[in-house]
Amino acid sequence: MKNYYRRLKRNWKTKKSKAMNTTVVNFMLESGISLAIFALVYLLFLRKETFFVLNRIYLLGSVCFSMLLPFIHFRVFTEIPSIMLDEVTITATGYQNLLQTVFVYSSTISGAIEKTIQSIGLIRFIYILGTAIFLFVFLYRILQITALILNNECELKNGIRIIKIDRDTTPFSFFNFVFIDKNNANGSGMKEMLAHEMEHVRQGHSIDVMILELLTIFLWFNPFFWLLKRSIRENHEFLADSGVLKPEVSSAAYRMLLLNSAFLQQPVIANNFNYSLIKIRIKMITKIKSSKTAALKLSMGVFVTAALLLVFACENKKTIQENKVATKQADVVVKSVVVNEQLSSIKPDEQVFIVVEQQASFQGGDVNSFRDWVTKNLKYPDIAIKNGISGKVFVQFVINTAGKVVDVKVVRGVDPSLDKEAIRAISSSPKWEPAKQKGTKVMQQFTIPIAFQLQ
């Protein structure tokens, strides 16, 4: 008995681990594809335009949407399914239910791709390790900024706190704080640089930066995320530059100021004066403003969002809630659905139920007792083993009012050899206790998926 519970515990841990691995894979693929498409649209259509505020909304929205996409699901079409019994797994070794948990998800991602990625045993460990590292880096940078605020002189100016630090640096900002070199507080160009940082504060760019740093913890693995992250920070500089360049500020002098400050460094988590490529910033300063009609290019973002939701989030069939069964051989989890078909061996005037008041029972147990019986009576066909055939067969059957299994048929097959064996096993079932509706015996329909897997 102790060995039995020990096996159950080990199988449960294996099932939980694989489920988490599947979730990680699905998150990486869907968010990665979404980020790639949004990044491509930005680079091709939006990057050279001067409507910086709209670009800011597009870029930040793209990253946040890609983060959430794997968790968004819409049911757009629902059909009444047959009752779905838990999946039966048969191995090609003559032993039954020794395979680990089998998961069947209604995923829009290619099963081959997912299987390939999941075959890398360290993928979940690497992802969690990377997440932990970037979380540590994020907290360390926050502590750096906090130490600068607490350990240096502070001056309040126009509602903004000016922190004077003993460091050779150009000004940088973080939320309502602007940091400057106290040894160069009255130096050449300081007025314009302070105005630049105050634009960052006024426009709330630190909020964007914090969101990006938090998302970096989870999306660090994706190169397209880093591309969009850089584009957002770059766009912040365009916004601040355009806010500073007023009639009284010389554009030529400001461009020279950018060149002079190009090689000084500031904390990555802060907004700073010399961030991004100087050549691009100077080019955007001198660029003629985009026409209003150019803003229509942003409709590409709306189209991409709708397309991604349609592909990844919309489900065109109802998903049955997980049925989890613990047996001595293995645990099985199934998420599947089979649509009713026209019955072939039931008279037209006879009613077949799916949901009843008192469900049909098998040998004193529930439908899962039948699943165990099927497991013991199935045999992997030799011809299928020889030809390397595996897959999942969905069998539908009816328990009539006499308790007999009738109208056995394959509603989704794999190969004639596997289909035939599945039908043979179900058809040889002993009698059931028929279902009852309002005290009267009635016929009830079930569907059972049988997974044949080669070892």
Image (tube, rainbow, N blue to C red):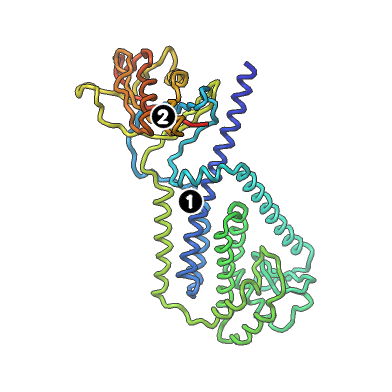
Q: How crowded is mark 2: few (under 14 residues within 10 Å), some or many (20 or more)?
A: many
Point out which mark residue 449 bears: 2
**Residue 206 horizontal/vertical position (percent):** 61, 64
Question: Farthest residue in the left direction?
Answer: 349
The structure residue drawn at horizontal position 61% and vertical position 41%, both measured from the top left corner, is: 121
The structure residue drawn at horizontal position 42% and vertical position 52%, both measured from the top left corner, is: 309
Helix, strand or loop at label 1? It is helix
Query: Dot 1 corresponds to which residue?
Result: 69
- Distance (Cα) linking label 1 and label 2: 30 Å
Amino acid bearing label 1:
Leu
Residue 351 occupies which quadrant of the picture? top left
Is the Cβ of the residue at disc 1 closer than 8 Å to that at disc 2? no
Helix, strand or loop at label 2? It is strand
The structure residue drawn at horizontal position 62% and vertical position 15%, both measured from the top left corner, is: 1
- Seen from the viewer's position, the closer of residues 219 and 160 is 219
Residue 46 to residue 449: above or below: below
